[in-house]
Image: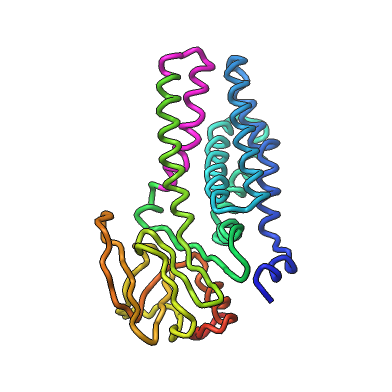
């Protein structure tokens, strides 16, 4: 039975929780924001309403048609909703509902299983993608700031123009387009780093550590296991935190590892390498079911 058939049969609950949470945003967080904007001019209120409804609708579409880009839309939207709730919540009568809803949606958006669901929207047949963890230096601050930078870049210019501040609004609008494009592209690139289980074996696709995706054939794989503390395997984790998995091969295989600071690549002949998926135990269980040898597969 292929993975897609299993998924349809099991009807996972998580996607529907994410969708329900996001559908509740206009009636909870949206109410808070509307109250907070009550004293502003009509053009500002209308502009804010149009932009926020358009952003909300874009995320709805991304949740109805799962794609890797939809993960970026959801997480940016969830961060923006939480930030707006925090800004508008002071003294609001609906704070008891809006704040928790925004927090719940943010948690659901960041759950690894949510990311896995969305990036597999474009997977093929028996293929199954598992996201790789982001490098620790990126997670520690830049990714959160980037997620906040996108809504700030989109909203600031139009709101300043609506308030009649033409020069500042024009400059902010021009800067916002550039900032939004660059940041969204960077965030999207982080959702395109996967370990992919395919009928032939396992593919490691990570532009941060490898020049090109590499296929490790099932017949060439000795074992996939939780990495021992004293491993001497080639580190392809990109500095990510969390449980790393070790892939051992029966024979050496050539991989082109990216050098630091994007200064080209360097070929390595490896028999062991490390990678860090967001759901390592789920990957081990799935790999075992595909006749890839796994040391002590989780139950």
* Quarter location, residue 253: bottom left
On whether residue 156 falls in the magenta region, the answer is: yes
Q: How is the image coloured?
A: rainbow
Q: Quadrant of the C terminus?
A: bottom right
Q: Which residues are magenta?
A: 143-168
62 or 122, nearer to the observer: 122
Q: Residue at x 51, y 68 (%)?
A: 196
Q: Residue at x 59, y 14 (%)?
A: 41
Rendered view: 26 above or below 225? above
Q: Residue at x 43, y 74 (%)?
A: 245
Predominant secondary structure, magenta span? helix
168 or 202, nearer to the observer: 202
Q: Position of residue 219 (x, y in %)?
A: 47, 85
Numbered-mark total: 0
Left-right relation of 102 to 163: right
Q: Position of residue 83 (x, y in %)?
A: 52, 38
Left-right relation of 199 to 152: right
């Amino acid at each position: 039975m292929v993975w897609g058939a299993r998924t349809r049969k099991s009807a996972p609950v998580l996607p529907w929780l994410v969708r329900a949470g996001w559908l509740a945003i206009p009636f909870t967080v949206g109410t808070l924001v509307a109250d907070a904007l009550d004293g502003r001019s009509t053009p500002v209120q209308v502009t804010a309403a149009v932009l926020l409804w358009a952003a909300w609708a874009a995320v709805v579409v991304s949740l109805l048609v799962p794609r890797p880009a939809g993960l970026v839309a959801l997480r940016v939207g969830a961060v923006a909703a939480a930030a707006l709730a925090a800004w508008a919540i002071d003294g609001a009568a609906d704070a008891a509902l809006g704040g928790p809803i925004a927090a719940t949606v943010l948690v659901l958006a960041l759950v690894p299983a949510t990311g896995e669901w969305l990036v597999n929207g474009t997977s093929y047949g028996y293929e199954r993608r598992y996201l790789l963890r982001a490098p620790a230096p990126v997670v520690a601050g830049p990714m959160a700031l980037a997620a906040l930078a996108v809504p700030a870049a989109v909203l600031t210019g139009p709101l300043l123009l609506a308030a009649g501040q033409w020069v500042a609004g024009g400059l902010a609008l021009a800067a916002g387009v550039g900032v939004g494009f660059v940041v969204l592209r960077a965030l999207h690139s982080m959702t395109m780093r996967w370990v992919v289980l395919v009928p032939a074996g396992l593919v490691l696709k990570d532009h941060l550590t490898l020049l090109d995706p590499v296929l490790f054939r099932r017949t060439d794989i000795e074992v996939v296991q939780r990495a021992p503390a004293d491993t001497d395997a080639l580190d392809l984790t990109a500095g990510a935190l969390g449980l790393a998995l070790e892939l051992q091969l029966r024979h050496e295989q050539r991989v082109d590892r990216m050098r630091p600071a994007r200064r080209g690549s360097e070929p390595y002949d490896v028999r062991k390498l490390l990678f860090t998926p967001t759901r390592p135990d789920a990957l081990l269980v799935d790999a075992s079911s595909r006749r890839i040898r796994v040391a002590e597969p989780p139950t």
